[in-house]
Image: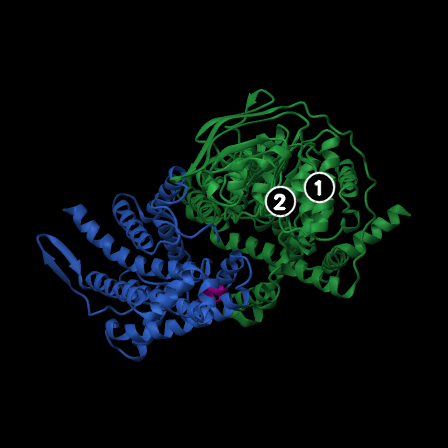
Amino acid sequence: MRTMARLRAWLTRDVNTLLLAGALGLAAWPFIQGDPYSLRLLTLSGIYALATIGYQFVFGHAGALSLAQGTFFGLGAYVAGILSVKAGLGFELAFPAAIMAAGLLAIAVSMPVLRLGSHYFALATLGIGQVVLLVAVNWESVTGGANGIAGVSKISLFGLTVERGWPLMLLVWGLVALGALAARHFSSGLAGAKFSLMREQPMAAEAAGIDIRRLRFSAFLLSALYGGAAGALQVHTVRVVSPEVLEFPVMVMLLAIVVIGGRTNIAGAILGAVLLVHLPEWFRPLEKYYLMAYGAALLAMIVAAPWGIVGAIAMARRKWLPEQNPPLPVAVSRPPGSARERLDIEGLVRHFGGVRAVDGIDLSIAPGEAVGIIGANGSGKSTLVNLIAGAEKPDAGYIRWAGARIDALPAVRVAQSGISRTFQSLKLVDGMSVLDNVAVGDWRSEIAERTRGEAVHLLDRLGLTEFAWRLCGNLPPGLRRRVEIARALMARPAMLLLDEPAAGLTEEERKDLARMLSELNRDGATLAVVEHDLEFLSRFASRLVCLDGGRVIADGTPESVRHEPAVIAAWLGRPPGQARDV
Amino acid sequence: MELLQLVINGVALGAAYALVALGFVLVLNATGAVNFAQGDLVVAGGFMGVALVGLIPLPAILLLPLVMLTMAAIGLAVSALAYWPLRDRPPVSVFISTIALGIIIQNGLNGAFGAEPRTAPAMFGAGRFEFAGLAVGHQSLAIMVVAALLIGGIHLLLGRSQLGRMLRATAQDREVAAALGIPVGGMVALTFALAAALAGAAGLLLANQFFVSPADGGNFIVKAYIAVVIGGWGRVGGALAGAMLVALFETVVAAWFDYAVASGLLYAALLAILFVRPQGLFGETVGRRA
C-alpha cells in the first residue's frame, strides 16, 4: 500500500509523468523516421542533454551563471579528437581522458573564480573560454589551428567499432541515462535541499553547517565532468574538431536549453535539448533567415515560460490536478543531547565605522542555562549573536567554546562545533516544503530516510506536522519562526542561539513558543535568546543579561535585572545618568 | 614616438568603446540586468550606415542623427520585447532574453547583408592630419570628437535636466522612484533607447576603419562587459575609463602580437585583475544583482 501511495504521489506531485511520456514519445521518433539525418539529430540531442544535465549543477543548483560550460564541452571534444586521430587511442581511454581534462581545468580555475560574485563570475568564466579558444587556434601543431582536425574516426571501444546511426545513438542515450541517474543521486532529496538553501539563503546555509565553498566547487566540477564527456561524444558524431566547438554559440545553446527546459529538472534538460536541437531544423524552409526565426522562437519561449517548460507544466498541473502528498516519513526520535560545552566571552569589541556596536562585552554561559539577552534597538544584541555565530569577526576580544577559541572560525565551522542559530529576518527557502526546510539543517546527514524521519519528529515537537508538505512561503510568520527553530535543532546543537524569535508573533504564539523553548531547555539544550519582550523571556529564561551601548549593564536573575535602575533607564531610552530625572 | 602613435589610435578606439560601455552601464543601473544585445546593436548601427549611404550618399556625420534616432526606436523595441515582460524575473532572465534578441539581430543582418565585412561611410572623408611625425586620421579624430560630444551630452542630460534626475532616480531605486510618481517603466524604456542610440553611433563610427560584419556583436558586448567590470560594476565614470583601458591594451599589445593573441591576453589580464581585486579596479556601486 505504502509503495503504491508513494508511486501515485510521485506521479502527481511532480511533472514527472508528463515528462516521462514526452521522453518516451521522443524515443519513438527514429522508429517513425529512421533516416541517418534524424538519427544524427537525436544523437546530438543526447549529447547536448548530457552537457546540460551537468550545467544544471552549477547554473540551476548552485545558482551561478557560469559561461564556461561550452569550454568544458569543447575541451572534451578536442582531447578526445586529438587522442583518437593523433595517438590512435581507443574510446575506452580517450573518453575518460576527455572527462579528466575538463575536470582538471575546472579544478585549476576554481580557486580564483569561485569566490567571485555573480556577474564577475560570469565574465571570468567567459574569459577562461576565450583563453582556451586562443590556445586551440594558435597551438597548430597539436590542435590543427583554425582549421582544426578532420577525419575523426568512429568510436572504437576495446577494439569494437561503434557504427554511426543506431549504435552510436544508443550508446549516447545510454550514457545520458547513466548521467541522469548519477545527477539524480547528487541532486535529489536532501542534496537538492542543501543546494536550494545555499543558493537562496547562503548565510542560513553556513549557519546550518553546510560548507558553501565545497558545495559550489563540487557543482562546478561535476558540470565540467559532464561537459567533457558530452564533448568527447560530440567529436565522434560530427567527425571534426575545430575552434567552432569552443565558441560562444555552443554556450548559448546550453544556456537556452537549461532555461527553456528547466533549471534543475533532469527531464527538463533532456526535453530542452531535444527541442532546441530540432528547432532550427523546423525553420529550414525560411532559408537564410532560419536562425533569425530560431532566435525569435527562443525569445518567445523565454517570455512565455520564464521558468521553463517544466515550470509551466508544473503550474498547469497544480491548477488541474489536485496535490497528492506522499505519506510522511516515520518519525525517528533522537536522544536529547546533554550539553557540556561552556561559552566564555571576554572583552569582545566590534566597530562599524565610528560606531562601537559591541564595546567590551564579558559574558559566560554555562551548559544547560537558558539566558535571555535584552536591550534596546542598537544596543548590540544582534551584533553579539553574529559574532558568536561567526558571521562577523570581532575587532578585539575572545570567544571560547568548550575551551577552544572560535572567534576566528568561519560561520560554517562554528555551526559544526555545536552552536546553531536563527535569524531575526527569517532565512528559509520559500519554494521548498516545511519538511525539507527542516531536514536540510542536519549537515551530518548521510541517510536521507533517517534524517527526514528525525525532521518529522521535530515537526511533531514544534506542532508543525500538519504543515509538513506546505511550501514555507505560504506559512504565516509564527509558523515560519518555528520552522527555523526546528531547522536549527536538526543540527543537534549544544547551544541554540535565537535572534528575536518572538518578533511578529501574536501573544498566543509567543506563549506557545516560550513553552517549547522551556521544554527544549529541560531536555538539555543551552539557550541564548535575544529579545525585546521581557514577558516572553521570563517564561523560560533563568537568567537575563541586559545590553546598552554595546556593554553589559546588568546580569542576573530575571527578577533582579528587571529592577536594576540602569536597566529601567535604558529601557526608557535615556542614558543612565539622567534616570533620576524621570 | 611609435608608442605615442599607438596611444592616439588606442584613444580613438577607446572613445567608441566608451559609447558602447556607457549604454551598457546605463541599462545595467536602470534595470539591474545585463543587456547582452548591446553588441549586436553596435553592429546594427554599422550596417545602418552601410545601408543609408546607399540611399543617401552623404558623409556619415550627416547620417549620424538619423542612425541614432532609428536606433533609439529599436532600443524601445528591445525594452518592450526583452525586458518589459521579464521585469519581475531574476536579472538572469533578461541576460538570456537579450542573447536571444542578439541572435535575431545578428541573423537578420546576416540574411539581409551577407556574412562579408562591409564598410560604412567616413565621417568627413578620408585623409589625415600630420604633425611632428604623428598621423591622426580624420576618421580617428572624428570618432574622438563625436564620442566626446555624445558623452558630454549624456552627462549634461543626466546631471542638469529634470529628465536626467528622473532617470537617475530610477537607476538608484526603482521602488522609491515609482513612489515619487516617476514613470519608472517609461524611464527604463528611455534608458534602453539611449543605450541603443549610443551603440548605433559607436557602430557607425567604427564601421569605417574596422569594417563591420554580422557576427561582430559578441566581440563588442564582451569588450563593454570587461570595461564595466574593471571600471566597477555600475560606475558610469569607471565604465568610460575601463573602455579606454581595454582599447589601449588592445592597440598597444596588438602592435607586438597579432590581434587574436592580444584579445587572449586581455582576458588573461582580466582574470588577473579579478584574482587580485574581486570587486573590479575601482570597486562597485550596484549590489550583487545580475
Confirm whether the magenta stretch covers residue B38. no
Q: Look at the picture and state if A548 lies above or below B285.
A: above
Q: Badge 2 sits on which subunit?
A: A
One can see residue B228 in this view: yes
Q: Nearer the viewer, residue B253 or A517?
A: A517
Q: Residue sitting at 31 percent across and 62 percent down?
A: B211
Residue A565 or B178: which is nearer the viewer? A565
Q: Residue at x 40, y 63 (%)?
A: B169
Q: Which chain is green?
A: A
Question: Please, what secondary structure does the residue beneath circle 1 have?
Answer: helix
* Residue at the extreme top: A403
| Image position, residue A359 (x, y; %) | 45, 33
User: Within 10 Å of the Cα at label 2, are there few (<14), some (14-19), or many (20+) other Cα atoms?
Assistant: some
Mark 1 Cα within 10 Å, few/some/many (few <14, many 20+)? many
Left or right: residue A227 versus residue B282 is: right
Image quadrant in which you'd find residue B234:
bottom left
Question: Vertical placement of A446 versus B50: above or below?
Answer: above
Residue in front for this viewpoint, A150 or A452: A452
What residue would you read off at disc 1? A514
Q: Which residue is mark 2?
A: A533
In space, the residues marked 2 and 1 are separated at their CA atoms by: 11 Å
Residue at x 77% of width, y 57% of height: A17
Name the amino acid type tagged 2: Asp
Q: Position of residue A86 (x, y in %)?
A: 51, 37
Chain for numbered disc 1: A
Precedes in sequence: disc 2 or disc 1: 1
Q: Which mark is residue A327?
A: none
User: Chain B shown in which color?
Assistant: blue
Question: Dot 2 lies on which element?
Answer: loop
Where is B156 relative to B256, above or below? below
Where residue A164 appears, x then y in whole percent? Answer: 65, 49
- Residue bounds of the magenta highlight: B101-107
